[in-house]
């Protein structure tokens, strides 16, 4: 009975503490981060005033690549709205643009439905400065009674800062590509992919391990095809199922398209890709610049409101051993869309 008595005392004490924290805890919050990004405010503006284009640098978009986002209203205008639904990292909710002051200020209302219900206001300020545009990205709102309890125990700034910093870093990289002119030189070519069959080795790894993964497995795939009686129908490929910028990891297959009917050797698999609508970018240059081509593809998909399908394909058309000039290396990048 004494144990029960002490337990009730403890519970009562915790309730009292919670009530006190709920009464005296911070009633509001305002978390923000800043960065100087390439380009003028006029160049940056389309990427922060459009809910569609903001997905290109959103830190949450990469946390759930299967997140469903639906848009209503006229893009880049007050009243335009997005509804999102994803995994536990991104939850479920909506964002509605409420204020737009061209090239200077954007504000939107956020309504979170999952994992808990709450509201907040997101804002972005642009200011011309030496070297580019000074961007302030923030989130502010009011804490209810329960929220004040948690705000007294946890730092909202520490919770939100990594995402804000990641998003501004991605916006900086995006604007560097946009303002360099490299992206506009790359054309997205719509088409129809008839389907294909690949022999490959699949693996999940850090991006830094890619070169070694390809070096070990692509020659082995070609050798296995020859032994099994298959005929290569293209150049070496990377089939990318996921690409996590934040973690620096990827899930892919080092593969070669082929014709014939073969059985996959141990450690390899036959991968069949169905017919689908496709988008192709022909990129000439060293492999460390491939990210620009993917950014062009992302912009195109967002602007056309298309839904990409997995995997994305990189076909390494030029053999670096036969062509020493990296500027002449052709990589064909293919995305499939619904």
Image (cartoon, rainbow, N blue to C red):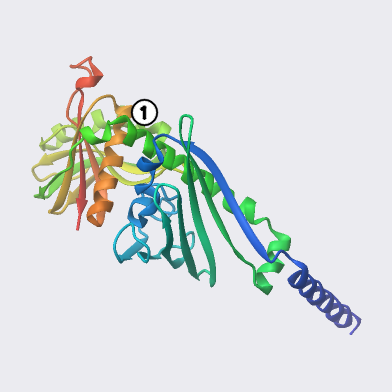
| Residue 45 location (% of width, % of height) | 38, 46
| Quarter where residue 257 is shown | top left
| Residue 321 location (% of width, % of height) | 22, 17
Q: Nearer the viewer, residue 294 or 196?
A: 294
| Quadrant location of the C terminus in the rendered image | bottom left
Visible residue check, residue 267 = no
Q: Check disc 1: other Cα within 10 Å, few if <14, some if 14-19, many if 20+.
A: few
Circle 1 residue: 212
User: Residue at 29% of width from left, 46% of height from top?
Assistant: 298
Q: Where 34 sits versus 11, above or below?
A: above
| Residue 198 location (% of width, % of height) | 18, 43
| Residue 304 location (% of width, % of height) | 22, 54
Q: Nearer the viewer, residue 321 or 323?
A: 323
SS for tag 1? helix
Q: Where 154 sits versus 180, above or below?
A: below
Image position of 4 (left or right of 51): right
Image position of 302 (left or right of 171): left
| Quadrant location of the N terminus in the rendered image | bottom right
């Amino acid at each position: 009975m004494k144990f029960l008595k002490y337990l009730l005392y403890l519970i009562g004490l915790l309730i009292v503490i919670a009530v006190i924290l709920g009464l005296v805890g911070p009633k509001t919050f305002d978390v923000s981060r800043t960065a100087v990004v390439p380009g003028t405010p006029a160049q940056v503006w389309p990427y922060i005033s459009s809910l569609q284009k903001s997905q290109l640098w959103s830190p949450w978009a990469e946390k759930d690549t299967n997140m469903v986002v639906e848009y209503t209203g006229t893009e880049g205008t007050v009243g335009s709205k997005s509804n999102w639904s994803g995994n536990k990292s991104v939850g479920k909710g909506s964002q509605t643009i409420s204020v737009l002051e061209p090239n200077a200020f954007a504000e939107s209302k956020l309504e979170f439905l999952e994992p808990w219900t709450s509201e907040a206001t997101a804002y972005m300020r642009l200011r011309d400065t030496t070297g580019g545009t000074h961007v302030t990205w923030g989130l502010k709102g009011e804490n209810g009674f329960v929220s004040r309890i948690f705000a007294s125990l946890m730092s909202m700034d520490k919770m939100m800062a990594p995402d804000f910093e990641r998003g501004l870093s991605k916006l900086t990289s995006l604007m560097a590509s946009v303002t360099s002119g490299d992206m506009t030189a790359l054309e997205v070519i719509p088409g129809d992919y008839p389907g294909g069959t690949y022999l490959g080795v699949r693996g999940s790894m850090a991006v830094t391990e890619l070169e070694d993964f390809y070096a070990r497995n692509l020659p082995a795939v070609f050798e296995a095809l020859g032994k099994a009686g298959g005929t290569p129908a293209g150049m070496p490929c990377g089939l990318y199922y996921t690409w996590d910028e934040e973690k620096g990891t990827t899930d892919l297959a080092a593969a070669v398209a082929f014709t014939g009917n073969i059985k996959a050797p141990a450690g390899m698999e036959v991968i069949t890709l169905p017919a689908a609508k496709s988008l192709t970018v022909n990129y000439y240059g060293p492999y460390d610049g491939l990210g620009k081509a993917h950014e062009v593809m992302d912009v195109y998909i967002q602007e056309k409101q298309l839904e990409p399908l997995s995997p994305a394909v990189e076909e390494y058309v030029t053999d670096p051993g036969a062509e020493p000039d990296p500027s002449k290396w052709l990589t064909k990048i293919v995305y499939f869309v619904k």
